[in-house]
Image (cartoon, coloured by chain):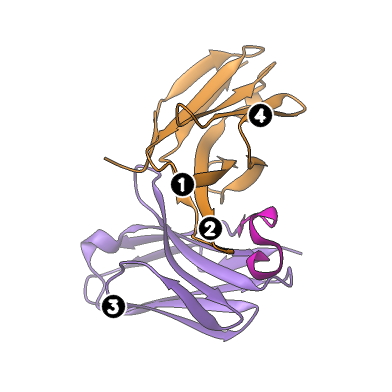
Amino acid sequence: DTAVSQTPKYLVTQMGNDKSIKCEQNLGHDTMYWYKQDSKKFLKIMFSYNNKELIINETVPNRFSPKSPDKAHLNLHINSLELGDSAVYFCASSDFKRRGYNSPLHFGNGTRLTVT
Amino acid sequence: QKEVEQDPGPLSVPEGAIVSLNCTYSNSAFQYFMWYRQYSRKGPELLMYTYSSGNKEDGRFTAQVDKSSKYISLFIRDSQPSDSATYLCAMAEISSGSARQLTFGSGTQLTVLP
């Protein structure tokens, strides 16, 4: 009955590879997000989707491409991985469109990406 | 200068102590303030949120906002080892019926020693 689940939990890969991270939420929320947390715990938004529509796209290399097949899923594909992409990537969801900030972010447990 | 500054710690206190965690910010348009708790190897979870200046209390936790000083605090009374985690402040602007996304502090790592 996990609210926001993301897979894989750990991802170790070599530079230049392409990889995907999957995220699913079963809360019925209307908005989903990808955040990146660096080694200093700084959490920064990358993308936000509302009902399959991209509404926030922060300054992120275009090697990163989100894809939302439906309201409950938001996947993250990364092309040509670089050493600097190593971080923890968090998926999150909220009912932002209906409730604004009264609907808090619900985070998954993160995907720890290590690029060697 | 980052929009939100937070002392990263680490902060170690004995069980039962009162803990004070703080953030300062530079963007006077921030109106919505939150505290998230993040346990090791887990995602952040919301502890408290407030729109206004002043204090908001929830059990052992009190959130304090001083907009004039651009300063927010989280106080934990009677701290427990289970409070050991990283605490992240987060803030947002709310304007014209829409809202920008949250800006997070870098987190303070807290350890409560039994």
Spatial CA distance of label 4 from label 3 is 40 Å
Q: Are marks 1 and 2 in contact (CB under 8 Å)?
A: yes
The chain letter for the residue carrying disc 3 is A
The chain letter corresponding to purple is: A
Please tell me which residue is depicted at 65% across the width and 70% down the height of the picture.
Answer: A97
Q: Is B37 contained in the magenta span?
A: no
At a point 61% along the width and 56% down the height, the residue shown is A105
Q: Amino acid at mark 3?
A: Arg
Q: Nearer the viewer, mark 4 or mark 3?
A: 3
- Evaluate if marks 3 and 1 touch, with contact meaning CB atoms under 8 Å apart: no
Quadrant of the image containing the N terminus of chain A: bottom right
| Mark whose residue sits in front, 2 or 4 | 2
User: Mark 3, residues whose alpha carbon is within 10 Å: few (<14), some, or many (≥20)?
Assistant: few
Q: CA distance from mark 1 to mark 2?
A: 8 Å
Of the 4 image quadrants, the one containing the C terminus of chain A is bottom left
The furthest residue to the bottom: A69
Structural crowding at the residue carrying mark 1, measured as other residues with C-alpha within 10 Å and reported as few (<14), some (14–19) or many (≥20): few
The residue wearing badge 2 is B95
Foreground of the two, B66 or A104: B66
Q: Which residue is mark 3?
A: A63
Give the spatial CA distance, label 2 vs label 4: 37 Å
Q: Amino acid at mark 2?
A: Ser
Residue A19 seen from this side: yes
Q: Which residue is mark 1?
A: B29
What is the CA distance from the residue labelled 4 to the residue labelled 1? 34 Å
Task: Give the vertical position of B106 relative to B69 (above or below).
Answer: below
Q: Which residues are magenta?
A: A95-106
Q: Amino acid at mark 4?
A: Ser
